Amino acid sequence: MGEQVLTVIQETVILGKRIQMYGSIENPLFLAKDAADWIEYSVSNVSKMLKSVDNDEKTLRKFCTSGSNYQTEAWFLTEDGLYEVCWQSKKSIAKQMKKKIKQYLKSIRLTGAAIDDERKTVDYYFSSFSDDLKTKIFNEMYQKNQELQQFYDDLMNTEGLMSINIMAKELGIGEYKLFAFLRKKKVFFYDKDMVNVPYERFRKEGKFAVKETPCHDGNIRSVTYGTKTGLDYVRKLLRKSGYYDNLETATN
């Protein structure tokens, strides 16, 4: 059996650009020529852009255009590939797009749907609806977005750190399984007290931090926390290891 033909699984508007996502929520793919347009890279020079990313950050796949059964083949960027071309770009729109798409994907992974720029989204998708109905849709979307934002505010403490338990929930993996995975990948190790701690280089890179933290029994213990950078890093490790692919296979 050949590779599955890709179709659009999510669509939204970000910074005035139509964003179409293929693949899956955990392993999204984006048409390279679309990505070039989003960050104002010359669409006629997409091949040059593709050369700037690693082989595992791009893939040549067959896909169906939205609303059509017509199949064609084109280059796609993975999530990491998209972030890489945004990072390499010197244009401010690329940095804004990277930030907005990250927020979009986070909201999808939490709720199965995304709410971004509520008013623009309502106007784009419900332009033919009455003003009263559009206002009702907007209010519901806005409330959901506020709840989602509160989740992330609670997720991160004042130092920008999250517990490994919260990190595991965000990544869709059990806490103990995550610890085992990170030990296997030589990110964590057992210290003399058999506590999971990160290797020094990952602390210096700002991916994890170890803090002296008061515990329920009144004692002070060293506790490992993750950062947003660490969260993105571990998600990338899980994707490259095939964790999410195996998860999807098991649920199908």
Image (cartoon, helix red, strand yellow):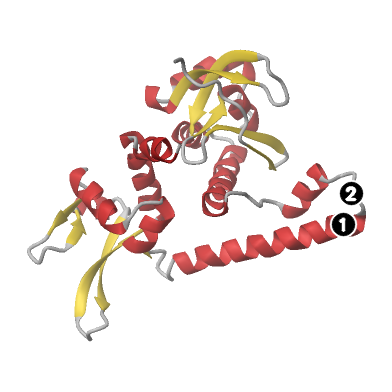
Residue at numbered disc 1: 133
Look at label 1 and name its amino acid. Leu
Mark 1–mark 2 distance (CA, rounded to whole Å): 6 Å
Q: Is residue 120 visible?
A: yes
Q: The C terminus appears in which quarter of the rendering?
A: top left
Question: Which sits in the foreground, 175 or 97?
Answer: 175
Residue 27 placement (x, y as % from top left): 47, 36
Quarter where residue 158 is shown: bottom left
The outermost residue toward the bottom is 218
Q: Looking at the image, which residue sits at the far left?
A: 192
The mark found on residue 129 in the picture is 2
Closest to the observer, 84 or 60: 60
CB atoms at circles 1 and 2 under 8 Å apart? yes
Residue lying at 34% horizontally and 39% vertically, measured from the top left: 243
User: What element does badge 1 sit on?
Assistant: helix
For the N terminus, give its image quadrant: top left
* 70 over 133 or under it: above or below: above
Amino acid type, mark 2: Phe
